[in-house]
Amino acid sequence: MAELTRRRVLLVTSSYAPTMIADMHRVRHLAWELPGIGWDVEVLAPGVQFQRREFIDQESAPLFNPEVPVHEVSPGDSWWIKALKMRSIGWRALRPLRDEGNDLLASGRFDMVYISTANFNLFCLAHDWSRRHGTPCVLDYHDPWVRDRIDFRTTRHKVKLVAGAILSRFMEWRALNGSAGIVSVSQVYIDELRKRYGNLSCLSDDRCRVIPFAGSENDFLLLGQTSRQRGANIEISYVGAGGELMSKGFLNICRALREVGKNSPELLEHVKIRLYGTSTDWREGEPKTLEEIARNQCGLGDLIQEDPRRISYTEATRIAWRSDGLLVLGIDGPGYMPSKLFSYALSGHPLLASFRSDSPMSGVFEKLPGLGHPLVWDAASGAAVGNHVDQMTQFLREVAQRTKFNRRDLVADYLAPAMAWRHAELFEKIRAEQRGMSREG
């Protein structure tokens, strides 16, 4: 890519320092990396008054670039938001972000807007801003916004779930009509958009990029490489979503563990598998879904212990660093790409991942055979593809020996600096095309 002259991008997300939620990490990484390759950065986000208390992580300050200007907005809840008792940032912050964004874009100093969030309502800002200011807006899809079926629940309230599903189709069409390009963690999500909306200009090949979540070397370094006292137990950890979302992937892990226990029980003798943060809304007395799968369906007893309560990102990073082995789970959906995969690879620990045969992870593990041990399962039946017992056996042996892997060169193309370059290339292409269209007009 040719050397870039200085540009400026407004990064929009639904939370920022000191809040740590999964859907803001892309912006956090870009805020560190883009300035070094010709794109100055400013961040626009809802302030801490919008955020749930448990998501505020006061230890996270070193993980944010202190040189980047941050524009925070405060709640100004409309009467109808108060009447409906709406807590969603996607609704409550929509108007304050729109107004602040209008003020910022009116200055004329921004070449691009990049909206990266799983609060998809905020994508609608692209329609208003692009038409009012002419600034191209790129949308970043971490997950599908519109689903043909309501397979995964994001709220306990059925009325909100159904209403959101109905509104999302119109809102997504409107947002895409105002956007200049799409970034997605999965090609599946782009294909679904094209199937649903046809030949919108933002969905053309030259306006779309598949960019997985980046691995970050900074996170382990800035938080401190803490270690734990080595005892008799060997600890394997998983941190992330659980419940029905991950049940098929986790069941395949448990089945492989059960078979290893029959053939080589010594490999499980000192192993403890701990699952953290699997349900952020979990309440005392509610089921521990994954632990019950292990115990009731596979007879693994207390080998696996689940703590569903949310833990902070900084604590999750420290858990990953001090563990002896790490697990990655895929969901029963074709497009899912886990956010922690490449950061986990950088930990150097043995890695085992369970995922659908048609998921993006399948291609990654084929391309990077030294990444870890894949447990691949059939999308239709959930049955194992390949020899899961052999993969699990090799993984457990590496864990028992506390083997360390230097995967830095292996995953270099998936780290934050490389992902920032891919964003900058797309931004520059869109900017150049927009300027060309303006001259022709």
Image (cartoon, grey):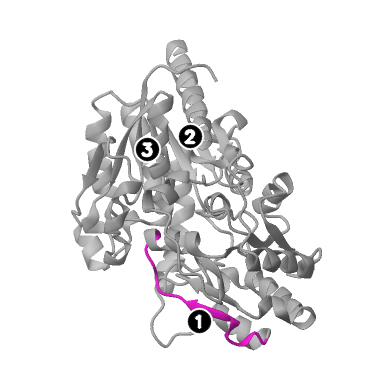
Kind of residue at disc 1: Lys
Say if mark 1 contacts mark 2, CB within 8 Å: no
Q: Nearer the viewer, residue 3 or 412?
A: 412
Query: Counting residues from the N terminus, which is met first, the one under dot 2 or under dot 3?
Result: 3
Confirm whether the magenta stretch covers residue 318: no
Q: Secondary structure at mark 2?
A: helix
Q: Which mark is residue 288?
A: 1
Q: CA distance from mark 2 to mark 3?
A: 9 Å
Quadrant containing the C terminus in the rendered view: top left
Image coordinates of residue 331 in percent, x first then y, are 60, 64
* Left-right relation of 252 to 342: right
Picture quarter containing residue 137?
top left
Say if mark 2 contacts mark 3, CB within 8 Å: no
Residue wearing tag 3? 31
Picture quarter containing residue 103?
top left
Residue at 43%, 25% (x, y): give it: 37
Quadrant containing the N terminus in the rendered view: top right
Magenta segment boundaries in residue numbering:
299-313
Q: Is residue 243 visible?
A: no
Q: Secondary structure at mark 1?
A: loop
Kind of residue at disc 3: Ala
Kind of residue at disc 2: Ala
Residue wearing tag 2? 420
Query: Counting residues from the N terminus, which is met first, the one under dot 1 or under dot 2?
Result: 1
Label 2 crowding class (10 Å Cα cut-off): few <14, some 14-19, many 20+? many
Picture quarter containing residue 268?
bottom right
Say if mark 1 contacts mark 3, CB within 8 Å: no
Image coordinates of residue 133 in percent, x first then y, are 31, 28
Q: Is residue 376 visible?
A: yes
